[in-house]
Image (cartoon, helix red, strand yellow):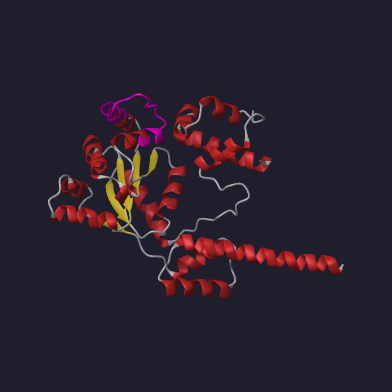
Amino acid sequence: MQQSEIIKISEALRKHCNLIGSQNKAAKSLGISTAQVSYILNGKTDGVTDAFWRLLSAKLGLSAEGEQPWVVSQTQAYKQVIFCVSYAQESSQTMAMTGSAGLGKTKAIDVYCSEHPHAYHLCCSEYWNRKTFLAELLKCMGVDFGGYSVPEMVEDVINCLKSKDHPLIIMDEADKLSDSVLYFFISIYNRLEDRCGLMLVATDYLEKRIMKGLRTNKKGYQEIYSRLGRKFIKLPALTDEDIIEVCSANGMTDPKAIKRLLQDLKNDSQIDLRRVKRVVLSTLEQMRSEQKEVNDEQGADD
């Protein structure tokens, strides 16, 4: 592990500790020991293995060693995500936000939560049950939950959030949650109304699911829809200007290459930032390779 990478990871860890409130809470949120956090922040890194550095880097959301850094651009969707989550936190509002896959929703939320205390980002999964959901939320908040029952975990969540200044829970990919877990949304809202912001973020499948539940009078769906203000905020699709901005911010400035990318996206009807990132990084790597060949030839001639 290069010393520059160690310094970058250590600084990111220090920032995370300051954001979450203490080394102890940071350790719990990252799933490592408080002693490990203390050693690293005090510069005692001789005994830390490369495997641990890589694990910590991933937990902190940093780029892998040697990976081409990626600049997050402020697309229209990005700006709206930041505006909505900021408003939800500052005003303790409850809302749902939907947008197609590949818009950059999760990355925008990551950026926001890395800069604002008491904003907790949950990336939901299909396999979560009620206890898993509560454990992930408590882990985000840096609260120990070992050996607790579900009712005890609920009380810990409520009490912890009540003690925070304008907390915010963002349930990303909420469409993956089972009904039994989604009902916790109602419980948390009922206990924390006007004390905590709540955001459901997903693809438009979440809206379709809620609306279908309303039509069939499914248990809990009227309550969920009411608490969302009977509205879903729809994020704008990516525009050509957004994609050009992403390309330029990451060093791909050749007009012909950008035009070719835009045309390919339109032909395939797949306007997706993940695909844009792959094409940009591939193009940049090809440009570096070609430049290296030119430099090698010039060196041989000399």
Q: Quadrant of the C terminus?
A: bottom right
Q: Which residues lie in the magenta part? A: 136-156
**Image: 20 above or below 247:** above
Instruction: Check if residue 138 falls in the magenta segment.
Output: yes
* Percent position of residue 256, x then y: 57, 75
Q: Quadrant of residue 301?
A: bottom right
In the image, is 1 to the left or to the right of 295?
left
**Image: 283 above or below 202:** below
Q: Residue at x 60, y 52 (%)?
A: 67
Q: Residue furthest right?
A: 302
**Image: 38 above or below 261:** above
Q: Residue at x 28, y 57 (%)?
A: 205
* Percent position of residue 83, x then y: 37, 53
Q: Quadrant of the N terminus?
A: top right
Q: Quadrant of residue 77?
A: bottom left
In the image, is 116 to the left or to the right of 70?
left
Instruction: Check if residue 265 falls in the magenta segment.
Output: no
* Percent position of residue 270, x then y: 42, 67
Q: Residue at x 63, y 42 (%)?
A: 5
Query: Which residue is at the front of the view, 147 or 158?
Result: 147
